Amino acid sequence: MRTDDYVVHIVDDEEPVRKSLAFLLATSGFTVRLHDSATSFLSVAADIGNACLVTDLRMPDMSGVDLLAQLKEMNAMLPAIVITGHGDVPMAVAAMKSGALDFIEKPFEDEVLIDAIRRAAERITGKPDNIEDVAAIRERFDQLSDRETQVLSAVVAGLPNKSIAYDLNISPRTVEIHRANVMTKMQARSLPELVRMTIAIDHGRS
């Protein structure tokens, strides 16, 4: 889908962040609309047409997770990306379970956001994303050792390596090794991709 065929709506309560993201995306050819709160975005969400959403996770009036929940209730869900601080991974996972396609941890490279928006735009036309067949993901998951499975669960829960090491009574270095093995065996290129795979497996069980 061409960048001028849809609008990117940015929801963030911090004006410098909104302006910075707007400049980045506008110079990359995107049409952008800015909203200073989740509430202000919700007031126009039902009539925005072809669009995708980039929202901060933590905002004073309503969190990104609550925003997605409200959009679902309105039947106005659209492809969404949440931007999160490093310590907000559990909330970001909750956002993905609520319908977000991706989350991006701060600080991030410009291309990371642009690529995520392009993937989200593919959903506007109904084109599926690149998530693989659940059976293939499950097959890779089954290759993990018991310890690697424990580390995977802890990583997806947002725990830092030191906490995982303490909980499992192993060294932080050993956690790093298991974590790297998990990424390799699952063929995940990033934490959000690993989360997407885990959610896909959970949905496949339900």
Image (tube, rainbow, N blue to C red):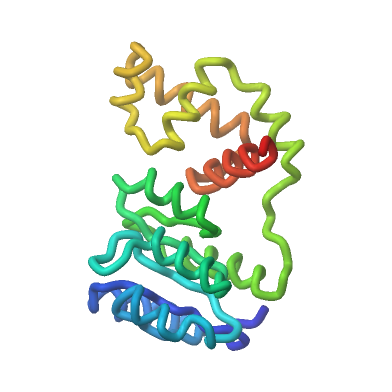
Foreground of the two, 184 or 95: 95
Residue that sits furthest to the top in the current view? 169
Q: Position of residue 160 (x, y in %)?
A: 32, 33
Q: Quadrant of residue 122?
A: bottom right
- Indicate whether 16 appears above or below 85: below
Residue 105 lies left or right of residue 144; in this view the side is: left
- Indicate whether 201 appears above or below 181: below
Q: Quadrant of the C terminus?
A: top right
Residue 15 lies left or right of residue 99; in this view the side is: left
Residue at point 33%, 62% (across, down): 63
Residue 88 lies left or right of residue 27; in this view the side is: left
Residue 98 lies left or right of residue 172; in this view the side is: right
- Indicate whether 168 appears above or below 5: above
Foreground of the two, 136 or 77: 77
Residue at point 33%, 19% (across, down): 165
Q: Position of residue 157 (x, y in %)?
A: 41, 36
Q: Quadrant of residue 167?
A: top left
Q: Position of residue 134 (x, y in %)?
A: 72, 41
Q: How many tags in the picture?
A: 0
Q: Quadrant of residue 61?
A: bottom left
Residue at point 31%, 72% (across, down): 12
Q: Quadrant of the N terminus?
A: bottom right
Residue at point 64%, 42% (across, down): 203
- Indicate whether 110 appears above or below 4: above
Q: Position of residue 77 (x, y in %)?
A: 55, 70
